[in-house]
Each structure stands twice: as C-alpha cells, then as structure tokens.
Amino acid sequence: MLKPDYLRQLVRMVAGTQKQEVGCEECFEQLDRFAEMSLAGKDAAAALPLIEDHLNRCDDCREEFEALLAALRAI
Amino acid sequence: MSERTNLEWWEALRGQPSAEALDDLRMILLRGLRYGLATRGDVTAADLEDFTQDALVKILRSLNTFRGESRFTTWAQKIAVRTAYTELRRRRWRDISLQDLLAPYEESDYTPEALLGDRSQDPAQWAMQRDMLARVERIIAEELTTKQRTAMTAVIIGGMNLEQVAFRMGTNRNALYKLIHDARRRLQARLEREGLTTEEVLVVFEDG
C-alpha cells in the first residue's frame, strides 16, 4: 500500500500539470536570458512563462537557477 | 581585467584561445561559483578550481552554441553552475543504488492500520482514507509503467535528484522529466475520468 505522505506528494505533483511543459534542456537553453531579466527587475515569468513553470516544478533546475543568480550578482 | 563585448569574447576564445581571455574567464567563473555555491557546506576551494576548469573545457567546446541572447559571461556562468551541480549531485548519491533507495517503499505488506494509525480516533475518516489509498494505488498500478513508477517514487519519496535518477535508469534528465510529465498527465486524466479532483484526494488526508 501507498504511504499517505507519498500519496499527498504525488497528488500535489499531479495537480496543475499542464499539457505543454518544457523539459530541463529547453529550460537550460533559456536560463541565462531568464536570469538576466530577473536581475534587471524585468518580469521574466511573464516573458518566459514556460521557463517559470518548469522552475517551479523541477528542483534540479531551480537549484541551478538560484545558484546562477547568486553567481551573477557577484561578477 | 578588460571588459569585452560578446563578439570580443567569442573571437578571443574560438580556435586557438587567447591566454589572457581564458584567464579572465576563469577568474570570472571562479568568483561566480564561489558566491553561487556559498550556501553549501560541501564545497572546498579545490572543488571550485576543478569545477571552473571543467566548465572552461565545456564552454570552449560549446562556443558555437552561444546565440548571443544574454551576455557571454552569463551564458558561461550557466554552464559552470551546471557543471558544478552535476558533480556535487553525483558525489552526494554516489553509493546509493535505486534498489537501495526504493526498497523500503516497495514492501507490499503495509496494512492500513500501520499506515493510517489508530482507527478508533475517527472511524469514518479512517475508512475514507483507507478507501482513497486503495483507489489511488489501483489507479497508479493501472496507469503507470514500471519505469514511470520507479522514477516518481525515487524523486518524490527517495528525494533523489532527477539527474541522478536518470543516470541510474540509463537515461538523461530531460528525458526523465518528460517521462514523469507523461505520468502526471496520465494520472490527471484518469482522476478526471473517475470524477475525482486532486483537491478531493488531498482533503481526505488533511489530518493524516
């Protein structure tokens, strides 16, 4: 049987699933542009909504995005 | 360190790269990684040097894929961050196989009592939770392939990075994301066909 915690997490993952989502590769291709827009105070989420959506779903890409922002603030 | 336009970077690094440009880029990436990875406690100065060196090799190799949609240094830093994280994730999960990770969750001898606790507290709620668990379990078994179940379980409850799960399943991160996306869509469609919303499933376990 499924553990209730697992079921909750799984159902949360299913909730809000979109027909069209980009994968990690497409996200990576746009990540530099997305990061520069974010740092410039522009609405990156509105300009690249599929990238924003991916970053909200994919922990690997989100982790890299946050590190990239921190790196870019330093250089 | 001289400021360069994207074109100047590109020209300085293609073919036989200029030593000065290479050194400037190395300094920029190193500084960026130092700050980008500052919150992690598992990165040494030697690691930063290694990640930077590996990233430089990758950047020179993929120079032709730079499309000029951002500053060159932003694009290069993106590659350096990916390089560093790939190695850090590999290290973190190095000694853990998928089999080890999933074994505790694949046991089929869980009983509703063990999972849901004492039924005497609220027998009606307990019965609803038990039925919902059984129903979702049946949906998963009928809708998902073994590969999809393995991937979702490893990511959701095993907490393993997508990249490392992908590596162990003989695929890549992008393909695995798409496999899981397909799984989510299948489950979503099936719940819809059964007239069940995700909110309805979650509400049953609100206090679980």
Image (cartoon, rainbow, N blue to C red):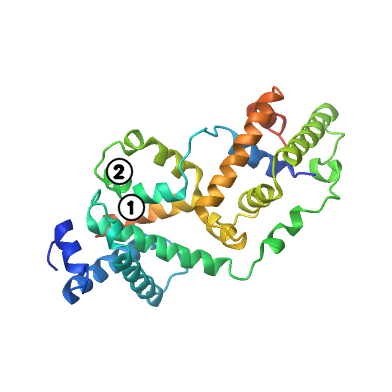
Q: Are marks 1 and 2 in contact (CB under 8 Å)?
A: yes
Q: Position of residue B68 (x, y in %)?
A: 23, 51
Q: Alpha-carbon neighbours of circle 2 within 10 Å: few (<14), some, or many (≥20)?
A: some
Question: What residue does disc 2 label?
Answer: A38
Q: Residue at x 37, y 72 (%)?
A: B54
- Judged from the image, the secondary structure of the residue bearing numbered disc 2 is helix
Please report, as a chain letter, where disc 2 is located: A
Q: Quarter holding the C terminus of chain B?
A: top right
Question: What residue does disc 1 label?
Answer: A69
**B138 left or right of B18?**
right
Quarter of the view holding residue A44: top left
- Judged from the image, the secondary structure of the residue bearing numbered disc 1 is helix
Q: Position of residue A68 (x, y in %)?
A: 35, 55
Q: Alpha-carbon neighbours of circle 1 within 10 Å: few (<14), some, or many (≥20)?
A: many
Quarter of the view holding residue B64: bottom left
Q: Position of residue B123 (x, y in %)?
A: 85, 29
- B109 vs B118: above or below: below
